């Protein structure tokens, strides 16, 4: 088993003025020092999807950092928690 494969998977949809403002790059920067796998991408409806697997502590810290740094662009955040399945390698922007 991959040593970075943890117990939780979050699918988080951020809505608001979240595209074209450096949101994805900011999320990657906010993840520094945290251990997680997954991706962040722009969605056709104008939202941004974060699909990430890691420890609950690291994922909650990432969300806290994103909210603090991008709060003026976010109007709504929807979080779904899922059991972790196959782990990816690293956290990246998906195009």
Image (tube, rainbow, N blue to C red):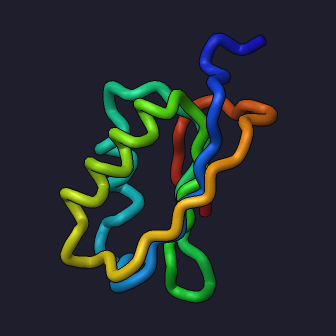
Which residue is more in the foreground, 70 or 56? Answer: 56
Instruction: From the top left corner, tell me how far across and down residue 57 is, in percent.
Output: 42, 31
In-image side of 21 versus 10 (left or right): left
**Residue 62 falls in which quadrant of the image?**
top left
Residue lying furthest bottom: 45
* Image coordinates for residue 24, horizontal then vertical, percent: 41, 60
Residue drawn at point x = 73 percent, y = 39 percent: 83
Quarter of the image with the N terminus in it: top right
In the image, 66 versus 29, the foreground residue is 66
Q: Residue at x 52, y 53 (%)?
A: 93
Q: Residue at x 52, y 28 (%)?
A: 55
Q: Residue at x 37, y 84 (%)?
A: 16
34 or 57: which is nearer to us?
57
Does residue 46 lie above or below 84 as drawn? below
In the rendered image, residue 80, in percent from the top left (x then y), is placed at 61, 58
Q: Give coordinates of residue 85: x percent, y percent.
A: 79, 35
64 w.r.t. 8: above or below: below
Q: In which quarter of the image is the C terminus?
A: bottom right
Left or right of 63? Residue 50 is right
Left/right of residue 33 with respect to residue 89 in the rendered view: left
Q: How many labels does the image show?
A: 0
């Amino acid at each position: 088993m991959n040593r970075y494969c943890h117990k939780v998977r979050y699918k988080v949809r951020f809505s608001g003025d979240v595209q074209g403002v450096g949101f994805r790059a900011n999320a990657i920067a906010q993840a520094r020092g945290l251990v997680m796998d997954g991706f962040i991408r722009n969605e056709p409806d104008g939202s941004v999807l974060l699909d990430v697997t890691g420890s609950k502590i690291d994922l909650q810290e990432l969300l806290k950092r994103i909210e603090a740094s991008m709060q003026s662009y976010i109007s709504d955040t929807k979080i779904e928690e899922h059991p972790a399945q196959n782990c990816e390698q690293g956290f990246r922007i998906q195009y």
